[in-house]
Image (tube, rainbow, N blue to C red):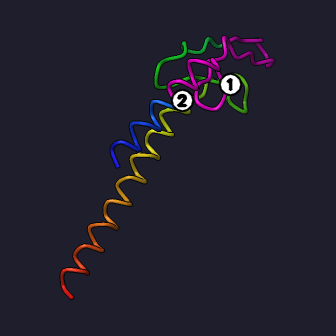
Amino acid sequence: MPRLLLSIFLIAIIFVTSVGGGLLWSDSHEACVHYGNFNSTWRCSKTGIFAYYTCCADSYECCFHLQGWVILLIACILISLLISCICIAIGFIRRRK
């Protein structure tokens, strides 16, 4: 199971570096503009390795989002844990018989 997780992670890294954007990697918006009374502009934080920022629905605030590869990694770990628990449960059931 760790080999599967590692291979998926490596494929994700290769995909991110070759494509430079898309589902697994996103860049932050430079700024969010609010056309209200004061026409204010909010600067979003820069893109990080784990997160990026976009303009919220209100369009004058920056919203935090996890990078796609982080979500993929968390999903792979959770699926791996679920499969491991199922295999352990099946092993206990077979030993009882």
Residue 62 sits in quarter: top right
**x and y percentages locating residue 65 in the rendered image:** 56, 31
Q: Which residue is mark 1?
A: 55
Q: Quadrant of the C terminus?
A: bottom left
Identity of the residue drawn at 66% across and 11% down: 30
What is the residue that sits farthest to the bottom in this orientation?
97
Residues shaded magenta: 12-41
Identity of the residue drawn at 33% across and 44% down: 2
**x and y percentages locating residue 79 in the rendered image:** 43, 54
Identity of the residue drawn at 45% across and 30% down: 10
Q: Amino acid at mark 2?
A: Gln
Q: Specify the label residue 67 is tagged with.
A: 2
Could you tell which of marks 1 and 2 lies nearer the N-terminus?
1
> Mark 2, residues whose alpha carbon is within 10 Å: few (<14), some, or many (≥20)?
many
Question: Is the residue 2 above or below the residue 62 in the image?
Answer: below
Q: In the image, is 39 to the left or to the right of 74?
A: right
Residue 73 sits in quarter: top left
